[in-house]
Amino acid sequence: MEVSKNPDRLNYSTKAKQLLDKVEESNYLGLANKGGAGVSRSEIFLFAMALGAESKSPTEVKNPYAGGLVLDKSIDSKTQAAMYAQLISQLSDPENDLDEITKKGEVYKLAERYANTGFECIEEYIDTKKPETLVWDLFLELDAQYETLKIEKE
């Protein structure tokens, strides 16, 4: 009899670990968690996952960092809600496939893949954009998305 093992942490790649070390050093976009008084690991994961989901290109986590990024018991409710919502959005028939969200391993795997893509986006931002420029670019993107939603509602 095989016992299914629920994941006990959110994983990320060794490359993403190195990136977060760089973020910690420079406090890029205020994403550092210096002394526990900054952005939590759960929030950083959520930010990376959102960037990855926006790209619609989940990337397999190869060479996962041994310690993981966030322990299951430390994942905040916003991050959990976003992870489960992301999986639900992928279901072809959400009303009949909702049993899929009980598969915690699948929820985590999809979230980790999107976060992995998001970490690659953050790395590109660090390599190519000053934080001040990126903030304005992101504001312009939000404005464009708002206008699109506003038009769709009318």
Image (cartoon, helix red, strand yellow):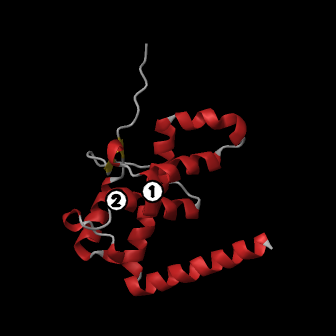
Q: Quadrant of the C terminus?
A: bottom right
On the question of residue 11 being in view, the answer is: yes
Quarter of the rendering containing residue 150:
bottom right
Residue pushed farthest right?
Answer: 154
Q: Secondary structure at mark 1?
A: helix
First along the sequence among labels 2 and 1: 2
- Residue at image position (59%, 59%) is 56
Coordinates of residue 78 in the picture (x, y in percent)? 46, 55
* Residue identifier under label 2: 16
On the question of residue 130 being in view, the answer is: no
Coordinates of residue 92 in the picture (x, y in percent)? 71, 43
Amino acid identity at mark 1 = Ala
- 27 lies above or below 136: above
Coordinates of residue 140 in the picture (x, y in percent)? 57, 83
- Residue at image position (57%, 50%) is 85
Q: Which mark lies nearer to you, 2 or 1?
A: 1
- Residue at image position (64%, 50%) is 89
- Residue at image position (25%, 69%) is 24
Q: Which mark is residue 115?
A: 1
- 147 lies above or below 93: below
Dots 2, 1 in contact, CB < 8 A:
yes
Amino acid identity at mark 2 = Ala
| Residue 19 left/right relative to 56 | left
Pick the front one: 131 or 123: 131
Pick the front one: 122 or 143: 143
Q: Secondary structure at mark 2?
A: helix
Q: What is the distance, in whole Å, between disc 2 and disc 1 at their CAs?
A: 9 Å
Coordinates of residue 47 in the picture (x, y in percent)? 44, 63
Q: Residues within 10 Å of mark 1 (few under 14, many from 20)?
A: many
Q: Quadrant of the N terminus?
A: top left
- 52 lies above or below 89: below
Q: Residues within 10 Å of mark 2 (few under 14, many from 20)?
A: many
